[in-house]
Image (tube, rainbow, N blue to C red):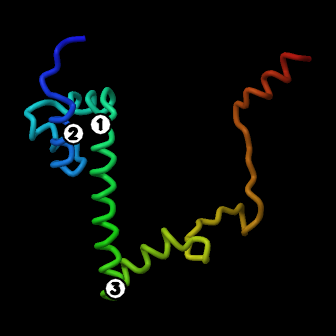
Amino acid sequence: MSERRYSAAQMAEAVTKARGFITDAAKELGCSRATVQRYVNDFATVKEALVDAREKRHDYVENKLMAAIGDGNITAIIFYLKTQCKDRGYIERTEHTGESGGAIRIEYVNDWRARADDSAT
């Protein structure tokens, strides 16, 4: 294996500083996204830094969502209900039916099964 330009610790620090954004970590170090991804794949410490940074980012966003809900933001409330309270009936589904609400009729055109049946006889 060729000598690496960065240590795993340097890469992990850049990933942490970039809050888990691979492109930002690459820009910080002056390398490509592929280089950062290679370090993530090759070093458990870098992968752990990436996972931790993204978890912190998710926590931050969830806290903002909960603050918006606390402020009465109806869009945030609806979003939360649709994504987190499906078991309570807050879900949208698209119903597919056939003509006049009946069963869906499926017609095979150029069906390979029909050709196989013809060749068997």
Numbered mark located on residue 14 in the image: none
Give the residue at x 15% y 37%. Answer: 26
Give the residue at x 17% y 42%. Answer: 13
Badge 1 marks a residue whose secondary structure is helix
* Position in image of residue 50 (x %, y %): 29, 44
* Position in image of residue 96 (x %, y %): 65, 62
Gap between marks 3 and 2, in whole Å? 35 Å
Report the side of 86 relative to 53 (left or right): right
Report the side of 44 relative to 28 (left or right): right
First in residue order: circle 1 vs circle 3: 1
Give the residue at x 12% y 30%. Answer: 31
* Residue type at the position of mark 3: Gly
Q: Which residue is mark 3?
A: 70
* Residue type at the position of mark 1: Thr
Q: Which residue is mark 1?
A: 45
* Position in image of residue 73 (x %, y %): 33, 84
Q: Are marks 1 and 3 in contact (CB under 8 Å)?
A: no
Please tell me whether mark 3 or mark 2 is closer to you in this view.
2
Is 91 placed above or below 18 here?
A: below
Is 37 placed above or below 24 here?
A: above
Badge 2 marks a residue whose secondary structure is helix
Q: Are marks 2 and 1 in contact (CB under 8 Å)?
A: yes
Label 2 neighbour load within 10 Å: few <14, some 14-19, many 20+:
many
Gap between marks 2 and 1, in whole Å? 7 Å
